[in-house]
Amino acid sequence: MDTLILVSIMVLMLFARSGSARAATLIVSNEMQTLPNVPVFVTCRPTPELSKSVPLGQKIMIEIPSIAGDNEKVAGSRQSSHTLCVGTFYNKKNSAAYGMWFVLYDSSDKDHCKDSCSIVAKDYGFYSWNNNKKTFDLIPPRFWIN
């Protein structure tokens, strides 16, 4: 019986030290000024896909689920190992024949948005808060063609 208790404690300690799940909060505000009628969307994947519109002058908060680290994956688990959130103007990513998108959150980027990301949508792009510089940096745009 003592051996069973000892083994149980060792297993619990192993799981406690195996790495931490990565979760973040994405805060996106719509501060468009010269183009106030342009819709702003945030889409996060994989499943379940989440897509939200950010109304002019408002903020949305998206809780990004924990992502299993390499040591936390359980055999047979369907837990995703990668989450990507993108920002778009006019329509959701890939819902039109072409467009421009901005990576707002990427779970594979360990140096960016560890706990929370503050993003601002302005007239000509999305900007991410840089804690080191204490300013917003332009997120480089990417393009798609269907």
Image (spheres, grey):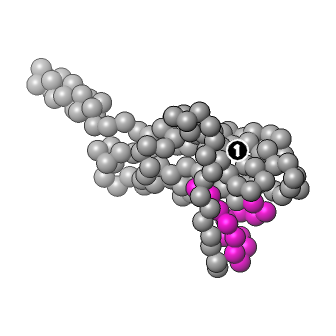
Name the residue: 28% across, 37% down: 18
Name the residue: 33% across, 43% down: 72
The C terminus is located in which quarter? bottom right
- Magenta residues, start to end: 89-103
Where is residue 2 shown, x and y percent of the image?
12, 20
Q: Residue furthest top?
A: 2
Q: Quadrant of residue 15?
A: top left
Name the residue: 73% across, 49% down: 121
Q: Quadrant of residue 116?
A: top right
| Residue 88 included in the magenta stretch of the image | no
Q: Is residue 72 visible?
A: yes
Secondary structure under badge 1?
Answer: strand
The residue under label 1 is which amino acid type?
Val
Q: Quadrant of residue 78?
A: bottom left
Q: Which residue is mark 1?
A: 120
118, 94: nearer the viewer: 118
Name the residue: 23% across, 33% down: 14
Image-based side of 34 in relation to 98, left or right: right
Q: Is residue 23 visible?
A: no
Q: Residue furthest front?
A: 133
Near mark 1 (Cα within 10 A), the count class, few <14, some 14-19 or many ≥20, is many
